[in-house]
Image (spheres, helix red, strand yellow):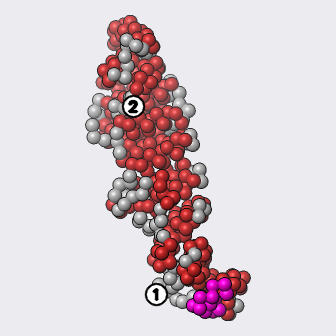
Amino acid sequence: MRFIALRSVVGLALISAAPVAALAQKPAPAAAAPAPKISKEARPALAAAQAAIKKGDFATASAKLAEADGLAQSNDDRFMIGSLRLDLGKAQNDVNIQGQGIEAVLASGLLPAGNLVQFNLAAGQIAYNAKDMAKADKYLTAAIAAGASDANVYALLMEAKIDQNKPGEAVTVLEQAAAAKPGGVPVPDDWYSRAFGVAYQAKDGPAVERAGRARVIAYPSAKHWRDALIGYRDTNAIDTQYVIDLMRLLRAASALKGQGDYLSYVENTYQKLPGEAAAVLAEGIKSGDIVLATNMTAREFNDVVKTKIAGDRASLPAGAAQAKGASGTGPIALATADAYFGYADYAPAIELYKVALTKGGVDTNVVNSRLGAALALSGQGDAAKQVFASITGPRAALAKYWIVWIDQPK
């Protein structure tokens, strides 16, 4: 199976002029199907058109078919008109006339099921090459529904959706192709890149999330994880707390890159979560993305977290005791759990997230986002997936990403 590159799809000819001519043999019904029953009104014009085609008198054939259009009484008439117009297009090597014939045959509803893929594909390709993307969309979708198995049909349909500014529907086609694995071959990475890029340019947050997730499932890499999560952040209205949780997954996927990623993460955590900020700074310095000697902002963050860590760490046992006690509240338990999480001390964090859920007064989806992450990072993948599966609302998208990460080899 050879896949086309999506960006060059316009030049593709699934059915070039010669193959269309071969396809354009009169589409007689399958052997078991009855022959069309032509009405007495349309019969003379159709007979004259057929005779003119055989003689090569294309002007007369065209005129008689136009006459038959106005005389047609039934779908049988329309089927035969389409069939003869297909013959006329073949004889003239005129793809547009062939397309008209194919469409008429399909519209008659009398085409045997075994020919639906072939005819819908031909109609879709002709429309695509004519840049009639709405029509191409219609027929290529029908070809797939009828069982088309050529990967390039999905490629053409994706591009037709993109040309109509339907990024969400283009991503749906990508997902269908990935699931179908046409030809037994995985969909190429550039298809995912194309769908993701178009969705991102359109600022279609849900489509970005789906395309990005599909890509990291098919082609997991630090780059693709970063594209997916940063793309999701950029195209969805999420608050600072959500951003922190997203950056945690980015870090878990080893996908932080450049001082911008590291310093954005640190900026959101250094005041209340100095342990986490310090760890992220250290990783940025080790990777070479942050150079303290030349980065004043990083130095300032580093100086602040150094003064906070000792006292913050020492306060955690008392905070945990208070959270679990009679006077404890859900918000206290959540804040203390977050601090433990920041130090990668996941066992007490997990316990306190559960306390927060019991005590109440907290956003359940926020707590479960962090409980699931703590479970995942501590190696309790199955338990984490159960928690993530319970998350609803906007954070469900991040939960799905975490589930993908859990299921991937580490």
Left or right of residue 115, residue 165 in this image = right
Q: CA distance from mark 1 to mark 2?
A: 60 Å
x and y percent of residue 250 in the render?
39, 31
x and y percent of residue 216 in the render?
38, 43
Give the camera-side residue of 149 and 291. 291
Q: Dividing the image into 4 quarters, which one contains the N terminus?
A: bottom left
Q: Amino acid at mark 2?
A: Leu
Q: Which residue is mark 1?
A: 32
Q: Which comes before the other along the chain, label 1 or label 2?
A: 1
- Tell me, yes or no, whether the highlighted magenta stretch contains residue 50: yes
Q: Which residues are magenta?
A: 46-60
Give the camera-side residue of 17 and 288. 17
Q: Which residue is mark 2?
A: 250
Query: What numbered label is drawn on residue 192?
Result: none
x and y percent of residue 136 in the render?
56, 63
Instruction: State the image quarter where residue 345 is shown.
Output: top left
